[in-house]
Image (cartoon, grey):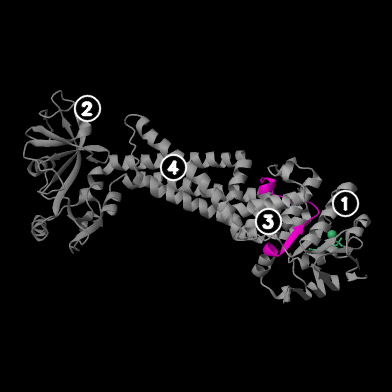
Amino acid sequence: MATFTIDEVKKTFSNGEIEEEILKGVNLKLKEGEITALVGPSGSGKSTILTIAAGLQRASGGEILFEGKDMTKMSQEEIRQIRATDFGFVFQSSHLVPFLTVEEQLQLMLDVAETKFNKKEQSKAIEEILELVDMNHRKDAYPSSLSGGERQRVAIARAIIHRPKVLFADEPTASLDTKRSKGVMELLQELTRTLNLTTLMVTHDEEMLPYADRIITMRDGYIVE
Amino acid sequence: MKIAWKEMKKSKAKFLILGSIIFLVSLLTFIISGLANGLSQDNAALIKDLPTGEFYLNKDANQTYNLSKIDEGMQKQILIDYPNATAFSVQMGFVNDAEDKQHSIAFVTSTESQLFPTVKEGEIILDSSLKEEGLEVGDVLTNNQFSGEFVVTGFVDQQKYSHAPVAFINMTNYQEIYRVMEMQAIFIPGKETPTLSALDSFSNKEFLNAIPSYSAEQMSLNMIVWFLVIISGMLFAIFFYMMNVQKIGLYGILKAIGMKTMSLFKMIWYQMMIITLISLALSIALSQVFSFVAPEGMPFHLTMETVLPLSAVFIIVGFIGATISGFQIKKIEPLQAIQQGEM
Ligand SMILES: Nc1ncnc2c1ncn2[C@@H]1O[C@H](COP(=O)(O)OP(=O)(O)O)[C@@H](O)[C@H]1O
Ligand SMILES: [Mg+2]
């Protein structure tokens, strides 16, 4: 079943006088429990469609249906709420909060998502997630003392601790070497299955494609399959 | 607001610097207010310590009390109509003691009243600061305009006028020294005071400001105080602005994962409150210590009545400063931060 439908989404950027159409009508259906990988040359609009779907910027045209509701018609506050509770984000760099420990990063996300956990449930949820990403032994560490791969695993933990329905990952392995990239992809695959996530991932690394359930190719603002 | 606290712990140096500047500015503010208060007490305790009421001067006096002369008939009628009213006069002058040493004083006389001590002819009651100049009860004082002698019959605390100690004398003696029959001013205590058509009326504050040097002194000191308060508000604005600029990326990410802009504001307010409260607590404590170690003769008078409202103003101004700096947070787009890609 499709939880997420992107229908004829367009995006135009205007640089002064010149209007440039970056997305020229993109159609995409994302499925639960699947990783959909977006590939294509640099500048083809992959990040743009991902961030529009994730509610981080507005489409210029088209519809984005999440659980039957059109996100393009929602207020900024409604979209924020969806981002907080239903979406998880992993970016190329981990973007952790420099002054919080691993455990505190996750606590913060639970607060932002306004989960109704009590203290005990919170620490249990954090422990479980850290177990999943194999970072329990570093839960009191600050980001500056973690390796790139460790940071990315913490970022993934942060993206799923509040049990979102959709996971957006824009080149999550771009800053890692092949071995670590594979580790992260295995993790994303496992989490997508066990937590029944709808995962949309952008990558330009061919080696990561075997982990995807579906591969969509973009070129010049179109999907070319 | 764990995140706000954690940030302060992690970047102690930055917050300590801001805290110590706020501490110093607020300490300076308290000390100057203490000085302003002390000086105003020293300048005009005689008038300041009177209850709320209305002062009346002759219309021809051009709002200057020592040019004012209240018509005797009118005064009599007013004192009958308003039993708690009092007519009084103040003039700067000198007395000489037994060793012919001159003491500068302000002669004050009044009609019978609860507000000023009652003095018999030939007697004088002095402000207690004259004890330090060696005067005692029983001493005999003279004045070259006065044919008789004054015997010191007592001392009163905190009665100063125009930076001089007050000397209360009987009306008859006063009239002889200054060769006037009329009194300068009438004071009627109370909130509901009459309008007397032939006289100009002044509130306590207006009358204080009519004392030469009083408003000049107070205005310049109070101006310094308000400048310091504004500076502290600007410090908050600038400091948080610079910190926010460094944290644009972080704020963008926090917004991207769904944090409310309001939560980011709360974070700044929380930090501002912690810094302000700690700095104020320290500077209040130290300014109280200062009032004990202040050099002898330095008029310094700082009560909680001054400190607490000023502290409240500091908090409000800090709040405004921090909030203004926060407006840029409102404008941050989460996307910008992600695309910059750091950390
Ligand atoms: N905010 C923006 N303003 C103007 N042009 C943009 C903006 N964001 C992206 N673009 C342009 O859109 C195109 C697609 O960008 P992007 O979606 O990031 O590509 P990809 O992720 O596939 O490499 C690029 O040519 C980029 O320069
Ligand atoms: Mg991209």
Q: Amino acid at mark 2?
A: Glu
Q: Secondary structure at mark 1?
A: helix
Q: Is residue B265 above or below residue B180?
A: below
The response on whether ligand 1 sits within 8 Å of label 2 is no
Same chain, labels 4 and 1 = no
Residue B254 has which mark? 3
Marks 2 and 3 in Cβ contact (< 8 Å): no
Earlier residue among tags 3 and 4: 4
Q: The residue tagged with tag 3: helix, strand or loop?
A: helix
Report if residue A98 is visible in the image.
Answer: no
State if disc 1 and disc 4 touch (CB < 8 Å): no
Q: Which residues are magenta?
A: A83-103
Question: Residue B201's x, y, as percent?
Answer: 23, 58
Q: Residue at x 73, y 58 (%)?
A: A160
Q: Secondary structure at mark 2?
A: helix
CB at mark 3 closer than 8 A to ligand 1? no
Q: Earlier in the sequence, mark 2 or mark 3?
A: 2
Chain under numbered label 3: B
Front tag of 4 and 1: 1
Q: CA distance from mark 1 to mark 3?
A: 27 Å
Camera-nearest label, 1 or 3: 1
Q: Nearer the viewer, mark 2 or mark 4?
A: 4
In this view, the mark in front (3 or 4): 3
Residue at 93%, 57% (x, y): give it.
A206
Q: Nearer the viewer, residue A172 or B50?
A: A172
Query: Which chain does the residue under circle 4 lie in?
Result: B
Residue name at image x 43 percent, y 47 percent: B311
From the viewer's side, name the closer residue of B230 and B333.
B333
